[in-house]
Image (cartoon, rainbow, N blue to C red):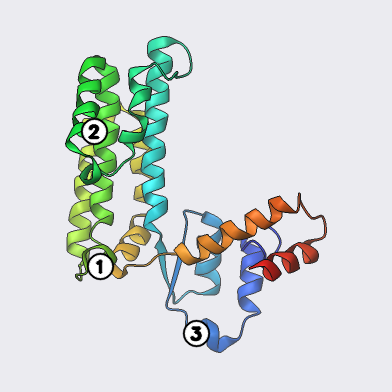
Amino acid sequence: MLGVVEGRTVAGTVDWLAAQPGQWRAGLWAVTIDMSTAYASAAREALSRALLAIDGFHVSQLANKAIGDTRRRVTHELRGRRGRATDSEYTIRGLLVRAEEKLSPAACGKLLCTLADLGGDAALAIGTAWRAKEHLRAVLALSPTRTGLATCRTDINRALTRFFTYAATTGATVPEIVTLAETVSRWREEIANAVLHGLSNATAEGVNHLIKLVYRTAFGLTNVVHQQTRARYRI
């Protein structure tokens, strides 16, 4: 809602939606958002008939954050400090968040060998977080925008069940995975909606990014109307 209304509140979003033409609101069959409780509440209140969906990018981003949090915790427990470029787990930080199918044989070998050399609970925690991320990516991979084929809720629910089962068994000792699973569980229906229909808010996120760049270039504008006008003029 940056550049449209001031703030990021339920009331502000609902008021803006209510001010739009009724025909336009009636034509909205789906709303795709990030994991924002404010936007979710606003959509449910002002657009109660619309399908609510969570963009897959934000789900992947959350999984990658869980890996980063796990790696940093492990480093602190092992070395009593923040990570350094010479730390073995730090050298594979980029490989851990890359899609498994995009890893070259050499990159995959480096990832697995580094974890094997690290050994112990540290390697187990990082490796488990990485595998949990891949289980979650398997859910998103069912989207028709990726496969070119229609999917169904049964397939999506099976993939989600595999992720939750892994998180509740192998990942149960890794707090970051538990937190990830709890968050995904809260948004399970909305994530499934996005995968089923191939929904994304990438266009809105792109525009939002441009608006933020305009605001930074202007070094902040205290007048909200001027701020919105500048953003719309540039975009």
> Which residue lies at the image location 20% right of the left edge and 33% below the top edge?
108
User: In the image, is 231 to the left or to the right of 221?
Assistant: left
- The amino acid at mark 3 is Ala
Q: Earlier in the sequence, mark 1 or mark 2?
A: 2
Residue annotated with mark 2: 107
Residue 57: percent from the left, percent from the top? 39, 54
Q: CA distance from mark 3 to mark 1?
A: 25 Å
Q: Mark 2, residues whose alpha carbon is within 10 Å: few (<14), some, or many (≥20)?
A: some
For discs 3 and 1, the disc positioned in front in the rendered view: 1
Question: Vertically, is 63 above or below 2?
Answer: above
Query: Mark 1: which amino acid?
Result: Pro
Q: Are marks 2 and 3 in contact (CB under 8 Å)?
A: no
Q: Is residue 184 left or right of residue 134?
A: right
| Residue identified by numbered label 1 | 144
For the point 17% across and 54% down, the residue is: 158
Amino acid type at mark 2: Ala
Q: Quadrant of the N terminus?
A: bottom right
* Mark 1 to mark 2 CA distance (whole Å): 29 Å
Q: Which residue is mark 3?
A: 26
- Label 1 crowd (10 A; few <14 / some 14-19 / many >=20): some
- Specify the quadrant of the image occupied by residue 226: bottom right
**SS of the residue under disc 3:** helix
* Labels 3 and 1: the sequence-earlier one: 3
